[in-house]
Image (tube, grey):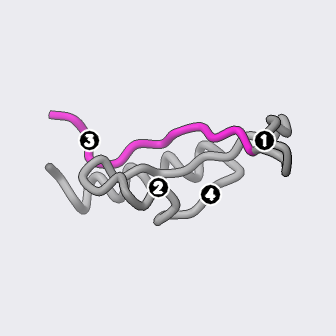
């Protein structure tokens, strides 16, 4: 069974659409991918992974 929520790495872009070198993490809901920013951005992957695991435990497929 595939988890409903997934952590993805996001490269931030500047005003000209060029990568800034800053990486943040966000949680994607595979069941409702239309709101990719619903759970916010995280500086640390560990923090995003912890919330993602919690969301998957609360909302099993």
Nearer-the-camera pick, 48 or 16: 16
Magenta range is 1-12
Judge from the rendering whether residue 18 lies leftward or rightward of residue 9; answer left or right: right
| Residue position marked by numbered label 2 in the rendering | 36
Q: Which residue is mark 1?
A: 17
Give the mark nearer the N terminus: 4 vs 1. 1
The residue beneath circle 4 is 41
Q: Residue at the location (47% across, 51% down)?
A: 27
- The residue singled out by tag 3 in the image is 3
Of the numbered discs 4 and 2, the one sitting upstream in the chain is 2
Cα–Cα gap, marks 4 and 1? 19 Å
Dot 3 alpha-carbon crowd within 10 angstroms: few under 14, some 14 to 19, many 20 or more = some
Residue 29 coordinates in the image, percent (x, y): 34, 53
Please state which of the two labelled residues, at mark 1 or mark 2, is closer to the viewer.
1
Q: Nearer the viewer, mark 4 or mark 2?
A: 2
**Residue 36 location (% of width, % of height):** 47, 55
- Using the numbered discs, state the Cα–Cα distance from disc 4 to disc 2 in whole angstroms: 10 Å
Which callout, 1 or 2, points at the residue further toward the start of the chain?
1
Most distant residue in the front direction: 16
Measuring from the top left, give residue 17's x and y in whole percent: 78, 41
Q: What whole-number distance in Å separates the C-alpha atoms at marks 1 and 3?
A: 31 Å
Q: In the figure, is residue 22 to the left or right of 50?
A: right
Circle nearer the viewer, 4 or 1: 1
Q: Count the marks.
A: 4
Tag 3–tag 4 contact (CB < 8 Å)? no
The reply to whether discs 4 and 1 touch (Cβ–Cβ < 8 Å) is no
The kind of secondary structure element at disc 1 is loop
């Amino acid at each position: 069974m595939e988890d409903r929520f997934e952590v993805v790495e996001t490269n931030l872009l500047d005003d000209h659409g060029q990568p800034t070198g800053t990486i943040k993490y966000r949680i994607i809901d595979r069941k409702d991918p239309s709101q990719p920013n619903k759970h916010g951005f995280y500086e640390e992957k560990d923090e995003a992974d912890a919330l993602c695991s919690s969301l998957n435990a609360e909302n099993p497929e």
